[in-house]
Image (cartoon, rainbow, N blue to C red):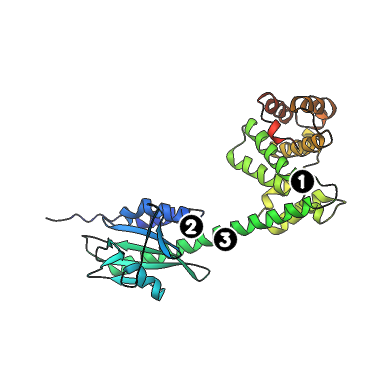
Amino acid sequence: MSTEVVNFPWQSALQELALTRTRQEWGNTLEYLGKELAEAGRCTFMAWKDPHWFHPASGSYYEAPESTVVGSSWLHAEPVHKANNAGEIVTGWPAEAPCWAMPMRSFGRVVGILTVEKAYLPTNIEEWATMLDLMAHSWDTVGRLEDHLAYQQQTEELLVNALESMPYYRTGHVNRVSQTANELGRLLDLSAHQRQRLKRAGRYHDVGLLISAADHTRAGADFLRNGKVHADLASLVENHHQIYSESLNLGLEEWALALAEHFQEFCESLPGESADALVQRFATQHGNRHNPAVLDALIGLSVAGKLEALLPT
């Protein structure tokens, strides 16, 4: 009986792994790609969950003593290759030779073990070593991204907390502006990317108050431009108090954030009124300050009953 060798384009699979945004996504994607990557073998990822090993795809926990491939790899914190008599991956899980186990690190700490088995097919050790190195690199890239995003979120929360600790600043204002802008973007048929920008800009719209109360819109925009990571939000933040004029040539995103911020400030000055009453009064008193299409979207949110949850309590 002969087996036809099919060369799977594992470079493409590695690119798919590198596109994931979290370590959990990376592990789940690996499970999906595993059979093809291992060319009729198995490819598994075990996360370290003291004192056991956790298999993301199955949700099962396993022991991994030193006599197993995973345990041996963990003990030495280095790749292990078993060409013959591979034994067990973990207790009760037989391994097919040849089998590799590679520690996956985050900031130097081993957080999981990748195992690859290439069953029933000829083995090209050099090619597989290259593939495993690239897998480790993709894991490192995704891990850095996840840690970077977590740091951004913590920094963002710190900025919001600092704003809301200022005198006369209403608790929850930042989140209400962010959510209102996102909902306006939905009714304006903005793309998912544009709505995400609106949501993010809502979180940062008043950050300039921590720098310069006299000109907080420009200060906030300069802060975002200088930081590079959120530079794409600078125009939205700089114009969030702008009065509508076609001559300014701003996009719907800028006008949506400007209305969301103004409407929430208006609502905070009139607690206890219904959403419909607030929208009617806002449109009458301030409608000429805003983009007509965005004002129509605000009225649409009221008609759809989606504003009540966005009002201050």
Q: Residue 266: x percent and y percent? A: 82, 35
**Badge 3: how crowded within 10 Å, few (<14), some, or many (20+)?**
some
Which residue is disc 1 drawn over?
Answer: 171
Which residue is disc 2 drawn over?
Answer: 23
Q: Earlier in the sequence, mark 2 or mark 3?
A: 2
Residue 209 vs 282, above or below: the answer is below
The label nearer to you, 1 versus 3, is 1
Q: Give the number of callouts.
A: 3
Residue 303 vs 258, above or below: the answer is above
| Three-letter amino acid code of the residue under disc 3 | Asp
Q: Earlier in the sequence, mark 1 or mark 3?
A: 3
Taking the spot 40% from the left edge, 71% from the top edge, the residue there is 74
Left or right of residue 184: residue 89: left
| Three-letter amino acid code of the residue under disc 2 | Arg
Q: Residues under labels 1 and 3: Cα distance?
A: 28 Å
Cβ atoms under marks 1 and 2 closer than 8 Å? no
Which residue is disc 3 drawn over?
Answer: 147
Residue extending farthest left: 1
Cβ atoms under marks 1 and 3 closer than 8 Å? no
Q: Residue 91: x percent and y percent? A: 31, 64
Q: Residues under labels 1 and 2: Cα distance?
A: 34 Å
Q: Which mark is residue 245?
A: none
| Three-letter amino acid code of the residue under disc 1 | Thr
Q: What secondary structure is marked by label 2? A: helix
Q: Quadrant of residue 119?
A: bottom left
Q: What secondary structure is marked by label 3? A: helix
Q: Earlier in the sequence, mark 1 or mark 2?
A: 2
Q: What secondary structure is marked by label 1? A: loop
**Badge 2: how crowded within 10 Å, few (<14), some, or many (20+)?**
many
